[in-house]
Image (cartoon, rainbow, N blue to C red):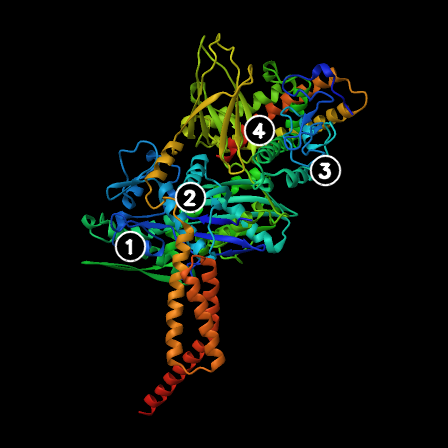
Amino acid sequence: MERIFGIDLGTTNSLIAYSDNGAPRIIPDRQTKSPLLPSVVSFPVPGEIVVGARAKELAAHHPLATIASAKRFMGLGMEHVTTEDREHYAFADGSKDVVRFRVCDREYTPPEISALILKELKRRAETDLGEEVRKVVITVPAYFNDSQRQATRDAGRLAGLEVLRLVNEPTAASLAYGLDKRNQGFIAVYDLGGGTFDISILKLHQGIFEVLATNGDTRLGGDDMDRRLAHLLLERVPSNLRGDPELVVQALAAAERAKIRLTDSQSAPLELHRGSIQVSVTITRAEFEALVADIVERTAAPCRQAMKDAGLGPGDLDEVVLVGGSTRVPLVRRRVQELFGRLPHTELNPEEVVALGAAVQAGVLSGGHRDMLLLDVVPLSLGIETVGGVTERLIERNTTIPTTVKQMFTTFVDNQTAVDFHVVQGERELVKDNRSLARFKLRGIEPLPAGMPRIEVTFMIDANGILNVTAHDDRTGREQSIDIKPSYGLTDEQIECMLEESIDFAEEDVHARLLIEARNDADGLLRGARRALAEARLDEPERSTIAAAMARLEAAVAGTDYNQIRDLNDELNQATTPLAQRIMDASIKAALERRRVDEVL
Amino acid sequence: MGSIPASAAGREGAMQAAGERVSCWQCNADHSPDFFCPKCGAIQLLPERTDYFQVLGVPRRLLVDADALQRRYYELNRRLHPDLYQTGPEMARQASLHNTAAVNRAYRTLRDPTERALYWLSLHNEKLGSNNNRVPRELATLVFEVQEKLEELRAAGGTDAQRAIEGELAAARTELRQRQAALTDALQENFRRWDAASADAPTLTHELKSILSSLAYLGTLARDVERELDK
C-alpha cells in the first residue's frame, strides 16, 4: 500500500514524517541530519532556486530575493499587508487581490513559495526512502480560515502532491502526545509558533480526540518577538541607513539568536556589525520579557474564549500541552501556567510534535491506527451577506466537521436568471468586519415570476475545514450551476497556468533522480573500496568478499534498478566496514603515537 | 413513547415513509435505509430527510440520556468517519462524508435541550413564530427593569453612579439565572409529559413554545448583561 506522509508546513521551519509500523519518524536532512527545513526560499540569481538552511544564509546578502515566513501571507489579500510587512518584503503592488511577492522581475504568490518548500521536503523523503512521495497530510493552524486552508491545499497541488487531508496543528500535536499515553480527559494545546497562535481544547476518550473549541490568531508568533528585538538594534542605527534591507535581515537574525540565548541565560548580547555600523547591546531576560509582554498577553483572550466555548473552567483540565518553538520562551511558559493553573507538558520537542502527529494522522488515513480518530471543528463561524450588510450565520464556530447546512434562495424580480450571494467567515455582526471568502453566482435559473424559483444551496465544510458549495433547483431537482470567485484565492485556471509555467515541475521523474543518486553513491563507495584494496593488507576471505560485492555493484550500476543499487551499496558498505574500522584505528594509533613523540620533543 | 401523528410530518422534518426501500450502490441489493448494506456491508448514503433520532439510532423521546447519546455518537463516528474511507471508492467516500455530517448535525441538535425541543416542534410542523417574540407576560417586569438598568449604566459611563448600577445589575443577573434554572426544570417536566403514554400534544406544544420563548428572551437579556458587566 502506498505510504502517506505527514508534513508540518511551518512559518519558520517545515518537516516531513511518516508512520513506520505505527511509530512516527521524522526524516532528517541527508547532509546536516537536521529534522528541520527552514521555510525560506531564495532566488540568488535568475533561474536558481534555493530552499532551506542555505536560503536562510543567503538572506543576509540577497534580502529582497529571499522570502521567509511566507505562511504569514497565505490566503490574504494586499489590503491585509501592513506597513511593517513592507519593511521585510517587496510586494507586487499592481496586485489587487492575493498577495504577490516581487522577486527580481518575477512575481510569486505565497502558495507558490510554499510549494517550493513542499517540493524540497518531497525530495528529502524520496531520497531517504527510495520511493516516490505523492500522498500527504499537511498541517495548518487551527485558526486558519477557509482562504488560508485553500491556499495551503493549492501549494500542495503546485508541488505535485495529492493533499489527502489538512489537519489542525494543535490537534496533530495532541495525537503525538496521546499515542504513548492513552490519555483520558480534557486537554488544552497551546501552540505558539513562528507566525501563528492556536489554542485548542480537546476531550480524549478511548482513542477519540474530540476538539471542543479552538481559537487563536493567525498573525501572532515568535517572528513578532524577533521584530521587537531587531527594532531595538535598528533604532540605534542612523535613521538614513535603517532602510537597508540587508541590515534589517541581519538585525532579525541577531534578534532570533539573542531570543534563543535568553531561554537559558539571564542576558544575551545583541549585536549588529555592518560596515561603519557597529551596534552592540546586552539585553537581560527581564528587559526582553518587558519588551514582548504584550505579544504574549495577546494569547490570553483566545485561551479564555476557547475555555468558555468548551464549557470548562480551569479546574476541569487534566493536561496542558505546549507546541511550537516560541513556547520555549520562559515568559510564555509562566503565562500558560497562570492561565490554566497547571504545569504544562514539554516532554516532546515542541518543534517536532506537530510533524509527529501529522505522521500519525497519515497512518490513520492509510488504514493503520484504526483505534484513533480525530473529531475536529471549524474555527470561525460561516455566514452569508444579507440586506444592509448584515451577516446571517449559517454555521457556528466550533461546529464539528464535516458539517452541512442548506439555504433556500429565490429571485426578487420577474424572469431573473441569476442570483448572487457572498460568503464570509468571522464572528462579527457586519459583513465588513468579517473576512470575505468568496462570491457565488447561481446561473441559468429558469425565467419565472419573482419568488417562484427555489434554489437549494448546500454549504458543506469537509473534514479539511474547507467550504464546498453545491446547489440544485428544488422544483426540477436539477443540479444548478454556480460560478465561484474566491476573494483572496487562486482560481483553478490560475493554478493550472502556474503548473504549466513552472519549468522544473514538468512531471519530474523521481525514478531517474533516485537512480542518479544511487549511482553517485555507488561511485563513491567503489572508489573507496578500490583504494582500500590497494593499500591495506587484507586476508584472502575478506578480500574476496569485498571483490565480490564490488563486482555485483558494478554490474548493478550498469542497469537501471535503483533499489538494487541501493541494496548493493549497503552490502559493499558493510563488507568494507571492518576494513575501514581498522584503517581508522591505525591512523588514530599513529596520531596518538605521533603526539607522544611530540610530547617527548 | 410519544408518537408523532402522521399529519404532523411536515416538509422540514418529514420522516421517511414506512417501508421505504433503497438499493445498494455496490451490490444493488434492495434494503431499508441504513448506514451499511445488509448484504455486502458497503457504506450507504442515508436518505437526506432521515430524522435525527433515527440517524443516531436512539428512541424518539424528548428525555435523552446524555451519556448514551454520546456513546452512540462516538460509536457511529468510529464506523462512518471520512478518515476511514480515504482510500476507498468515491461512492463510499461521499457516503461517509455526508453520513458523518448528518450524525454531527443530529448530535449537535439532540444533545442540547433547547435545540432538541425546537427540533421536536419542527417535527410537529410547529415553530416559534414571530408572535412569540413578544415579551412573555410573566417576564415583563423583570425585562423592563433590567433594560432600564442597562440604559442607566451606559449613560453613567465613568461616573460614581456606575458602581452602584453595576451592583444592581449583578443582582438582576442572579435573578435571571434563577429564572433560567426554573424554566429549564419546567422544560424537563414538559419533556417528561411528552414521553408519557397519554401525551396531550396540543397542550404540551403550547406550553413548550411558551417555555422556549421565555428561555430565548432570558438568554438574550443575560448575554446583554454579561457583556455590559464584562466591559
Q: Earlier in the sequence, mark 2 or mark 1?
A: 1
**Label 1 CA crowd tier, 10 Å (few <14, some 14–19, many 20+):** many
Measure the C-alpha gap from mark 1 to mark 3.
Answer: 60 Å
**Which of A168 and B77 lies nearest the eye of the viewer?**
B77
Whether labels 3 and 2 share one chain: no
Residue A427 visible in rendering: yes
Left or right of B179 in this view: A276 = left
Coordinates of residue A481 in the picture (x, y in percent): 47, 21
- The residue at which mark 1 appears reads as A58
Whether labels 3 and 4 share one chain: yes
Q: Which mark is residue A160?
A: 2
Asked if disc 1 and disc 4 are in contact, CB closer than 8 Å, the reply is: no
Please tell me whether mark 3 or mark 2 is closer to you in this view. 2
Question: Compared to A289, does B34 lie above or below?
Answer: above
Whether labels 1 and 4 share one chain: no
Measure the C-alpha gap from mark 1 to mark 4.
Answer: 58 Å
- The residue at which mark 4 appears reads as B222
**Which of A477 and A489 lies nearest the eye of the viewer?**
A477
Instruction: Count up the numbered dots.
Output: 4
Coordinates of residue A35 in the picture (x, y in percent): 44, 57
Question: Compared to A420, does A581 lie above or below?
Answer: below
- Callout 4: chain: B
**Label 3 CA crowd tier, 10 Å (few <14, some 14–19, many 20+):** few
- The residue at which mark 3 appears reads as B68
Q: Earlier in the sequence, mark 3 or mark 4?
A: 3
Please tell me whether mark 2 or mark 1 is closer to you in this view. 2
Q: Residue at x 71, y 14 (%)?
A: B7
Q: Secondary structure at mark 4?
A: helix
- Callout 3: chain: B
